[in-house]
Amino acid sequence: MSTTTMGAVAAHFGRDIDRTLAKLPGIIDQARERGVDLLVLPDATIGGYLHDMYHPAGETLPPAVDLDGPEVAAVRQMAGDMVVCFGIAERAQEGGAEVRYNTAVCVHGDGLLGVHRKVHLPLGESEAYRHGTGFDAFDTPVGRLGMLIDFDKTFPESARSIALDGAQIIACLSAWPASVTDRSDRLRNDRQAHLFDLYDCARAAENQLYVVSSNQTGVLGGLRFLGQAKVVDPAGEIVAKTWAKGGLAVATADVTADVARARRTMNHLRDRVENAYTLTTRPASATTSSPT
Protein backbone atom coordinates (compact mmCIF):
# COMPACT_ATOMS: atom_id res chain seq x y z
CA MET A 1 0.00 0.00 0.00
CA SER A 2 1.35 3.42 -0.99
CA THR A 3 -0.09 6.29 1.02
CA THR A 4 -0.11 10.05 0.47
CA THR A 5 -0.42 12.60 3.26
CA MET A 6 -2.37 15.66 2.16
CA GLY A 7 -2.39 19.00 3.95
CA ALA A 8 -4.75 21.95 3.45
CA VAL A 9 -3.81 25.33 4.93
CA ALA A 10 -6.07 28.00 6.40
CA ALA A 11 -4.00 31.15 6.95
CA HIS A 12 -3.88 34.89 6.35
CA PHE A 13 -1.66 36.26 3.60
CA GLY A 14 -1.61 39.98 2.85
CA ARG A 15 0.03 42.32 0.37
CA ASP A 16 3.52 42.27 1.91
CA ILE A 17 5.40 39.68 -0.15
CA ASP A 18 8.57 39.81 1.96
CA ARG A 19 6.52 39.09 5.08
CA THR A 20 4.83 36.17 3.34
CA LEU A 21 8.14 34.69 2.19
CA ALA A 22 9.36 34.94 5.79
CA LYS A 23 6.18 33.26 7.07
CA LEU A 24 6.02 30.36 4.63
CA PRO A 25 9.05 28.36 5.85
CA GLY A 26 7.37 27.88 9.23
CA ILE A 27 4.16 26.62 7.63
CA ILE A 28 6.00 24.31 5.24
CA ASP A 29 8.28 23.00 8.00
CA GLN A 30 5.25 22.27 10.19
CA ALA A 31 3.69 20.33 7.34
CA ARG A 32 6.94 18.45 6.75
CA GLU A 33 7.09 17.48 10.43
CA ARG A 34 3.61 15.97 10.05
CA GLY A 35 4.72 13.96 7.02
CA VAL A 36 2.79 15.98 4.42
CA ASP A 37 3.50 15.02 0.81
CA LEU A 38 1.04 17.45 -0.81
CA LEU A 39 0.53 20.90 0.74
CA VAL A 40 -2.20 23.20 -0.59
CA LEU A 41 -1.88 26.87 0.39
CA PRO A 42 -4.62 29.46 -0.24
CA ASP A 43 -5.33 31.51 -3.31
CA ALA A 44 -3.37 34.78 -3.31
CA THR A 45 -0.69 33.39 -1.00
CA ILE A 46 1.86 35.68 -2.66
CA GLY A 47 0.60 39.26 -2.61
CA GLY A 48 -2.81 38.84 -1.02
CA TYR A 49 -6.30 39.12 -2.49
CA LEU A 50 -8.49 42.04 -3.51
CA HIS A 51 -9.91 44.45 -0.93
CA ASP A 52 -13.19 44.95 -2.78
CA MET A 53 -14.87 42.33 -4.97
CA TYR A 54 -17.29 44.80 -6.55
CA HIS A 55 -15.00 47.59 -7.75
CA PRO A 56 -11.39 46.37 -7.51
CA ALA A 57 -10.22 48.67 -10.30
CA GLY A 58 -10.59 51.57 -7.88
CA GLU A 59 -8.09 50.14 -5.41
CA THR A 60 -4.39 49.34 -5.41
CA LEU A 61 -4.28 45.82 -6.80
CA PRO A 62 -2.21 42.99 -5.32
CA PRO A 63 1.41 42.98 -6.51
CA ALA A 64 1.84 40.75 -9.56
CA VAL A 65 4.77 38.35 -9.97
CA ASP A 66 6.20 36.33 -12.85
CA LEU A 67 5.96 32.55 -13.08
CA ASP A 68 9.74 32.45 -13.58
CA GLY A 69 10.40 35.16 -10.99
CA PRO A 70 12.22 34.97 -7.65
CA GLU A 71 9.03 34.64 -5.56
CA VAL A 72 7.92 31.39 -7.19
CA ALA A 73 11.52 30.15 -7.16
CA ALA A 74 11.73 30.82 -3.41
CA VAL A 75 8.66 28.69 -2.69
CA ARG A 76 9.97 25.96 -4.95
CA GLN A 77 13.18 25.90 -2.94
CA MET A 78 11.21 25.70 0.32
CA ALA A 79 9.14 22.82 -1.04
CA GLY A 80 12.06 20.45 -1.51
CA ASP A 81 10.62 16.94 -1.87
CA MET A 82 7.10 18.14 -1.02
CA VAL A 83 4.51 19.09 -3.66
CA VAL A 84 3.23 22.60 -2.84
CA CYS A 85 0.33 24.47 -4.46
CA PHE A 86 -0.06 28.20 -3.84
CA GLY A 87 -1.73 31.25 -5.36
CA ILE A 88 -0.27 34.34 -7.01
CA ALA A 89 -1.34 37.35 -9.01
CA GLU A 90 0.49 36.41 -12.19
CA ARG A 91 2.07 39.04 -14.44
CA ALA A 92 2.15 37.98 -18.10
CA GLN A 93 2.88 39.51 -21.47
CA GLU A 94 0.32 39.01 -24.23
CA GLY A 95 0.30 40.83 -27.56
CA GLY A 96 2.93 43.25 -26.29
CA ALA A 97 0.79 44.27 -23.31
CA GLU A 98 1.11 43.40 -19.63
CA VAL A 99 -1.87 41.45 -18.25
CA ARG A 100 -2.55 39.69 -14.96
CA TYR A 101 -4.23 36.45 -13.95
CA ASN A 102 -5.38 34.99 -10.66
CA THR A 103 -3.17 31.91 -10.83
CA ALA A 104 -2.52 28.69 -8.92
CA VAL A 105 0.99 27.30 -9.13
CA CYS A 106 2.18 23.80 -8.23
CA VAL A 107 5.88 23.34 -7.48
CA HIS A 108 8.34 20.73 -6.27
CA GLY A 109 12.03 21.06 -5.57
CA ASP A 110 12.67 19.81 -9.09
CA GLY A 111 10.66 22.62 -10.73
CA LEU A 112 7.28 23.96 -11.81
CA LEU A 113 4.77 21.11 -12.12
CA GLY A 114 1.53 22.84 -13.10
CA VAL A 115 -0.27 26.16 -13.55
CA HIS A 116 -3.98 27.01 -13.49
CA ARG A 117 -5.39 30.43 -14.32
CA LYS A 118 -8.76 31.09 -12.70
CA VAL A 119 -11.52 30.75 -15.29
CA HIS A 120 -14.64 31.95 -13.44
CA LEU A 121 -14.30 35.54 -12.21
CA PRO A 122 -17.16 36.65 -9.90
CA LEU A 123 -18.57 40.15 -9.48
CA GLY A 124 -15.94 42.76 -10.38
CA GLU A 125 -12.93 40.44 -10.35
CA SER A 126 -12.72 40.68 -14.14
CA GLU A 127 -11.68 44.33 -13.64
CA ALA A 128 -8.48 43.05 -12.02
CA TYR A 129 -7.76 39.77 -13.83
CA ARG A 130 -8.16 38.08 -17.19
CA HIS A 131 -10.07 34.81 -17.47
CA GLY A 132 -8.17 31.57 -17.76
CA THR A 133 -9.22 29.27 -20.58
CA GLY A 134 -9.40 25.70 -19.32
CA PHE A 135 -8.90 22.92 -16.78
CA ASP A 136 -6.12 20.35 -17.02
CA ALA A 137 -4.54 17.67 -14.87
CA PHE A 138 -0.80 17.10 -14.64
CA ASP A 139 1.55 14.49 -13.21
CA THR A 140 3.30 15.03 -9.88
CA PRO A 141 5.27 12.90 -7.40
CA VAL A 142 1.99 12.35 -5.48
CA GLY A 143 0.03 11.30 -8.56
CA ARG A 144 -2.08 13.04 -11.17
CA LEU A 145 -3.42 16.33 -9.87
CA GLY A 146 -5.59 19.24 -11.00
CA MET A 147 -6.18 22.69 -9.52
CA LEU A 148 -9.17 25.02 -9.11
CA ILE A 149 -9.35 28.54 -7.69
CA ASP A 150 -12.29 29.30 -5.36
CA PHE A 151 -15.24 30.31 -7.62
CA ASP A 152 -14.18 27.68 -10.17
CA LYS A 153 -15.48 24.98 -7.81
CA THR A 154 -19.00 26.44 -8.00
CA PHE A 155 -19.26 24.95 -11.50
CA PRO A 156 -19.44 21.12 -11.70
CA GLU A 157 -17.90 21.18 -15.17
CA SER A 158 -14.62 22.50 -13.79
CA ALA A 159 -13.87 19.56 -11.51
CA ARG A 160 -15.37 17.10 -13.98
CA SER A 161 -12.97 18.30 -16.68
CA ILE A 162 -10.03 17.65 -14.36
CA ALA A 163 -11.37 14.23 -13.36
CA LEU A 164 -11.79 13.26 -17.03
CA ASP A 165 -8.15 14.23 -17.53
CA GLY A 166 -7.15 11.55 -15.06
CA ALA A 167 -6.73 13.48 -11.80
CA GLN A 168 -7.24 11.57 -8.55
CA ILE A 169 -6.76 14.68 -6.40
CA ILE A 170 -8.09 18.20 -6.91
CA ALA A 171 -6.32 21.02 -5.08
CA CYS A 172 -8.78 23.87 -4.61
CA LEU A 173 -7.10 27.13 -3.56
CA SER A 174 -9.42 29.81 -2.22
CA ALA A 175 -9.66 33.35 -1.00
CA TRP A 176 -13.33 32.81 -0.16
CA PRO A 177 -14.95 35.48 2.03
CA ALA A 178 -18.05 35.46 4.17
CA SER A 179 -21.16 36.94 2.62
CA VAL A 180 -20.80 40.63 1.86
CA THR A 181 -24.58 41.15 1.63
CA ASP A 182 -25.95 39.02 4.48
CA ARG A 183 -23.35 38.88 7.25
CA SER A 184 -23.76 36.46 10.13
CA ASP A 185 -22.49 37.05 13.68
CA ARG A 186 -20.75 33.67 13.56
CA LEU A 187 -18.71 32.59 10.55
CA ARG A 188 -19.84 28.98 10.77
CA ASN A 189 -23.47 30.16 10.31
CA ASP A 190 -22.65 32.32 7.28
CA ARG A 191 -24.36 31.17 4.10
CA GLN A 192 -21.06 31.32 2.22
CA ALA A 193 -19.53 29.01 4.85
CA HIS A 194 -22.23 26.48 4.04
CA LEU A 195 -21.69 26.79 0.29
CA PHE A 196 -17.91 26.59 0.64
CA ASP A 197 -18.19 23.18 2.33
CA LEU A 198 -21.03 22.01 0.11
CA TYR A 199 -19.08 22.58 -3.10
CA ASP A 200 -15.99 20.81 -1.76
CA CYS A 201 -18.00 17.75 -0.77
CA ALA A 202 -20.09 17.68 -3.94
CA ARG A 203 -17.08 17.98 -6.27
CA ALA A 204 -15.36 15.12 -4.45
CA ALA A 205 -18.40 12.83 -4.38
CA GLU A 206 -19.61 13.39 -7.92
CA ASN A 207 -16.13 12.73 -9.33
CA GLN A 208 -15.13 10.11 -6.73
CA LEU A 209 -11.74 11.62 -5.93
CA TYR A 210 -9.98 13.57 -3.19
CA VAL A 211 -10.41 17.34 -2.81
CA VAL A 212 -7.80 19.23 -0.80
CA SER A 213 -9.30 22.66 -0.13
CA SER A 214 -7.41 25.64 1.34
CA ASN A 215 -8.60 29.13 2.18
CA GLN A 216 -7.53 32.51 3.48
CA THR A 217 -8.43 33.60 7.02
CA GLY A 218 -8.73 36.97 8.73
CA VAL A 219 -9.66 40.32 7.19
CA LEU A 220 -8.31 42.07 4.11
CA GLY A 221 -9.90 45.35 3.09
CA GLY A 222 -13.65 44.90 3.37
CA LEU A 223 -13.54 41.10 3.19
CA ARG A 224 -13.58 38.59 6.05
CA PHE A 225 -12.35 35.16 5.00
CA LEU A 226 -13.83 31.86 6.12
CA GLY A 227 -10.90 29.52 6.67
CA GLN A 228 -12.45 26.01 6.68
CA ALA A 229 -9.52 24.28 5.00
CA LYS A 230 -10.24 20.59 4.59
CA VAL A 231 -9.57 17.24 2.97
CA VAL A 232 -12.57 15.48 1.45
CA ASP A 233 -12.56 11.81 0.44
CA PRO A 234 -14.09 10.23 -2.70
CA ALA A 235 -17.38 9.60 -0.86
CA GLY A 236 -17.74 13.32 -0.16
CA GLU A 237 -16.89 12.97 3.53
CA ILE A 238 -14.73 15.58 5.27
CA VAL A 239 -11.86 13.66 6.85
CA ALA A 240 -9.90 16.66 8.21
CA LYS A 241 -10.86 20.31 8.74
CA THR A 242 -9.57 23.50 10.38
CA TRP A 243 -12.82 25.47 10.90
CA ALA A 244 -12.56 29.29 10.83
CA LYS A 245 -9.17 29.84 12.45
CA GLY A 246 -5.78 29.33 10.89
CA GLY A 247 -4.45 25.81 10.87
CA LEU A 248 -3.47 22.75 8.90
CA ALA A 249 -5.92 19.98 8.02
CA VAL A 250 -4.04 16.72 7.42
CA ALA A 251 -5.21 13.33 6.16
CA THR A 252 -3.32 10.26 4.98
CA ALA A 253 -4.77 7.86 2.41
CA ASP A 254 -3.98 5.34 -0.26
CA VAL A 255 -5.40 7.67 -2.89
CA THR A 256 -5.28 5.28 -5.84
CA ALA A 257 -6.91 2.45 -3.88
CA ASP A 258 -9.61 4.72 -2.43
CA VAL A 259 -10.51 6.17 -5.81
CA ALA A 260 -10.62 2.69 -7.37
CA ARG A 261 -12.81 1.41 -4.51
CA ALA A 262 -15.22 4.33 -4.87
CA ARG A 263 -15.58 3.66 -8.60
CA ARG A 264 -15.65 -0.13 -8.45
CA THR A 265 -19.42 -0.55 -8.72
CA MET A 266 -20.88 2.86 -9.51
CA ASN A 267 -18.37 4.73 -11.63
CA HIS A 268 -19.68 8.22 -12.26
CA LEU A 269 -17.21 8.99 -15.03
CA ARG A 270 -17.85 5.73 -16.86
CA ASP A 271 -21.64 5.87 -16.49
CA ARG A 272 -22.14 9.32 -17.96
CA VAL A 273 -24.62 9.63 -20.86
CA GLU A 274 -23.10 12.53 -22.75
CA ASN A 275 -25.76 12.84 -25.44
CA ALA A 276 -28.42 13.46 -22.77
CA TYR A 277 -26.83 16.62 -21.38
CA THR A 278 -27.40 20.23 -22.34
CA LEU A 279 -24.09 22.08 -22.13
CA THR A 280 -25.17 25.46 -23.49
CA THR A 281 -28.18 27.65 -22.73
CA ARG A 282 -31.14 26.89 -24.92
CA PRO A 283 -32.81 29.79 -26.76
CA ALA A 284 -35.91 31.12 -24.98
CA SER A 285 -38.02 30.16 -27.99
CA ALA A 286 -36.95 26.51 -27.85
CA THR A 287 -39.69 24.04 -27.04
CA THR A 288 -39.34 20.92 -24.98
CA SER A 289 -40.35 17.80 -26.79
CA SER A 290 -42.13 14.99 -25.01
CA PRO A 291 -40.40 11.63 -24.67
CA THR A 292 -41.67 9.00 -27.07
Image (cartoon, rainbow, N blue to C red):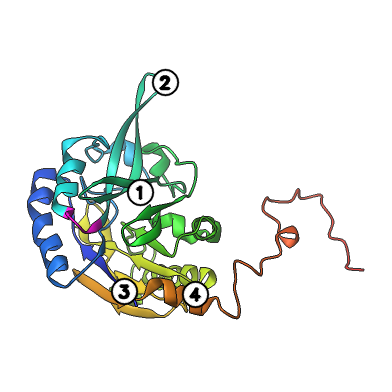
- CA gap, disc 4 to disc 1? 40 Å
Q: Main secondary structure of the magenta part?
A: loop
Residue farthest to the front, as pictured: 1
Q: Is residue 214 above or below residue 127?
A: below
The structure residue drawn at horizontal position 54% and vertical position 61%, both measured from the top left corner, is 156
Does 291 sit left or right of 176 as displayed? right
Badge 2 vs badge 3, beta-carbon distance below 8 Å: no
Of labels 2 and 3, earlier in sequence is: 3
Q: In this image, 35 relative to 289: left or right? A: left
Residue hosting label 4: 260
Residue 111 lies, in percent from the top left, at 25, 44
SS label for mark 3 = loop
Q: Residue at x 41, y 80 (%)?
A: 237
Q: What residue does disc 3 label?
A: 3
- The type of residue carrying mark 1 is Met
Residue 244 percent coordinates (x, y): 25, 72
Q: Nearer the viewer, mark 3 or mark 1?
A: 3
Mark 4: secondary structure: helix
Q: Amino acid at mark 3?
A: Thr
Asked if residue 244 is positioned above or below residue 68 in the image, the reply reads: below
- Give the magenta part as a residue range: 79-83
Local crowd at mark 4 within 10 Å, few (<14), some, or many (≥20)? Answer: some
> The N terminus is located in which quarter?
bottom left
Q: Are marks 1 and 2 in contact (CB under 8 Å)?
A: no
Inspect this view and state whether residue 138 appears: yes
Q: Which residue is mark 1?
A: 53
In-front residue for pair 114/65: 114
Mark 2, residue position: 95
